[in-house]
Image: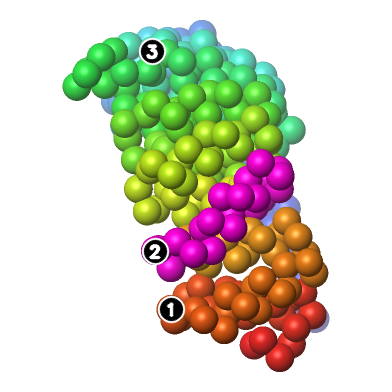
Amino acid sequence: MKVNRRGPSAALAAWVVLVALLLSCGSQGLPGDTPDARALAAAELGVNGANENIPPLVQALRRDQEIVQIQAATSLGRIGTVEAVAALREFIDADSRLVRQAVAQALRDVDPSAYPEAAEVLVEMGHKTLPKGPDKDPDLLVRAAVVTSLAVVQQPVGVEYLVDRLEKDADEGIRNAAVQTLGRLGDPRAVEVLIDVYHNDNEKNRSWAIEALGEIGDERGRKVILEALEDFDPVCRGKAAWALMQMDGEKAIPLLTERLAIEEDDMPAVVMAHALALLGRKDAV
């Protein structure tokens, strides 16, 4: 049997190219006569854990053109270390909104070991992107990137900011990302705002609020979950059934059985039957 020996040689060749690229950077930043060429050079430096690649990327973010800056931020995210997070933090006030957006997006790509540091930078960045007044929201897309990145890194330090955005943000997408993330974090600090979302937000966010309350499992959410079992929205009813299963386990069987018997919509009926099956009622499927 032939053994393929090209892999190690190819890897070695790649490292030789990378070392040559780093040496060519010198103190002048990334090599290349055009922004596109320098952006390509920046992309080549996005190697996981390669802290030695950080300096030329930082130089590019400080003084190169926007297309290069965006790629440099992306590559810092791919390096993914705590040191790369610190480098990204330097540019949370960059002049270009697109660069700031790229910084926020890069912070979701870091290694999980750097998630706590990334979350702290995202929260700091998020407070800088709040609306300036009615119809004055120049950093909406940056803020959206911050919230969706917090959804990836999922750190407790982001809870207060996410609660604030869920309460006050006019953008439905931001509220939706916030409500889903708060459920995944499972932090009881979010319970009251989730209850308010169920009572006052749109259908999409109301149903996600019920799911989040089930994931958190705080007793304050029980009344709302029971209320949602009879909601006009079938999605809310389905999510309420699942939330009740999460909170009560086998104790939820009688009520779920009762609700399944009178449920007329397919979606919640399927969820209820599946929940009952997981709880041991195989005849419910």
Q: Earlier in the sequence, mark 3 or mark 1?
A: 3
Look at the magenta stretch and give its main secondary structure. Answer: helix
Residue 48 visible in the shown view:
no
Image marks 2 and 3: residues in contact by CB distance under 8 Å: no
Residue visible at 79% across and 80% down in the picture: 280
Q: Residue 77, position in %: x, y?
A: 55, 31
Q: Residues within 10 Å of mark 3 (few under 14, many from 20)?
A: some
Q: Earlier in the sequence, mark 2 or mark 3?
A: 3
Residue visible at 42% across and 38% down in the picture: 175
Q: Nearer the viewer, residue 121 or 134?
A: 134
Indicate the amino acid at tag 1. Asp
Q: Nearer the viewer, residue 48 or 186?
A: 186
In the picture of the structure, the residue carrying the numbered disc 1 is: 265
Indicate the amino acid at tag 3. Ala
Q: How is the image coloured?
A: rainbow
Residue 232, numbered label: 2
Q: Residue 49, position in %: x, y?
A: 69, 32
Image marks 2 and 1: residues in contact by CB distance under 8 Å: no
Give the magenta part as a residue range. Answer: 214-234
- Magenta stretch: residue 225 in it? yes
**Residue 71 position (above or below residue 89):** below
In the picture of the structure, the residue carrying the numbered disc 3 is: 94
Indicate the amino acid at tag 2. Phe
